[in-house]
Image (cartoon, grey):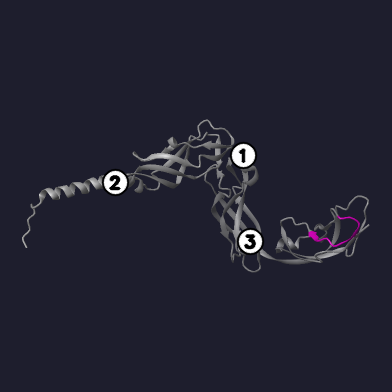
Amino acid sequence: MAWYPFRNLGLKFLALGLGVLLWFTVSGQQVERKVPGVQVHYRNLPAALQITDQVESVDVHVRGVENQITALLPGEVVLEVDLQGEVEGSRRLPLRTNQVKAPLGVEVTQVDPGSIPITLERMGTSEVVVQPQIEGEPAPGFVVTEITSDPPRVTAVGPERRLITSARAVTDRLSVAGANKTVSAVVNIGIEDAQLRLLKPQTARVTVRIEPGGTRTMTVRLTLRNLGPGLSARLESETATITLRGANRVLAGIDPSSVTVYVDLAGLAAGVHAPPVNVELDGRFALAAIKPSTVTVRIN
């Protein structure tokens, strides 16, 4: 069959024109859309302050040509909050559509919510003790007798309130599993509270002293503490048998009379009671066992 490309040329141009017109009509149609999770960027934070409570994202309503609105990518729409001139404390900041940065041709019609809470706190510094983190147990017959950090303290920076309540500097974990001699390594230091940081990145040399160890059992006389005024007390047993664990050289030098084993009577009135038996540990040794663990005491 013969093909006549120029037959009905007028109708073909008319159809093409209608198609183009339809495309422009559809693509130029104005639509509205909610863009969820728009990031909030805070800028011009005063130098002496730090944000400790903030909203990370909001929802933004936009309007524009359908194909442009549909093609919006994450990050093309952001909300900027200017903190210049703000002072310490908690408040709600109003949000306006002109704070939203969007591509040319995209109209911002609404920000949801209309305001957000924020807390600004004054910055400070504090010296905190470095707490080495150790994992694992030494080889059988050996014990950890000392753990040191060099440097022993570091400077933490952050909100003054959190420096007082939760400033804790810790190291990466150092394994002593199966060790039969002193272990030493350089490890990183960090601050556990995410709102605090080190004044400068630092490492520490952590040294874990490991020595031959064992146990020693001894009988020690019980003492009483915090007996109420005007009261007297009588113990069913006046001694306790304790087993201490530590380095052999330390255990050998312990005088039983220097170990304090006591019963705390604080808050106990007249009558018969069974408070726990306590041992005062000085860090050179650990308590492995105690008998009896409680003792009957009559208070008159």
Mark 3 lies on residue: 210
Q: Position of residue 266 (x, y in %)?
A: 84, 53
Viewer-proximal residue among 86 and 48 = 86
The mark found on residue 27 in the picture is: 2
Q: Mark 3 or mark 1: which is in front?
A: 1
Q: Is residue 138 left or right of residue 16?
A: right
Q: Please name the amino acid that badge 1 sits on.
A: Glu
- Residue at 44% over, 37% down: 97
Q: Mark 2 or mark 1: which is in front?
A: 2
Task: Identify whether 22 is placed above or below 300.
Answer: above
Q: Please name the amino acid that badge 3 sits on.
A: Ile
Q: Earlier in the sequence, mark 2 or mark 1?
A: 2
Placement of the N terminus among the 4 image quadrants: bottom left
- Residue at 44% over, 43% down: 60
Would you say residue 268 is visible in this rendering?
yes
Mark 1 lies on residue: 160
Q: Position of residue 167 (x, y in %)?
A: 62, 46
Q: Is residue 252 left or right of residue 4?
A: right
Residue range (magenta)? 268-278
Packing grade of label 1 (10 A; few <14, some 14-19, many >=20) is some
Helix, strand or loop at label 3? It is strand
Q: Mark 3 or mark 2: which is in front?
A: 2
Task: Identify whether 24 is placed above or below 179.
Answer: above
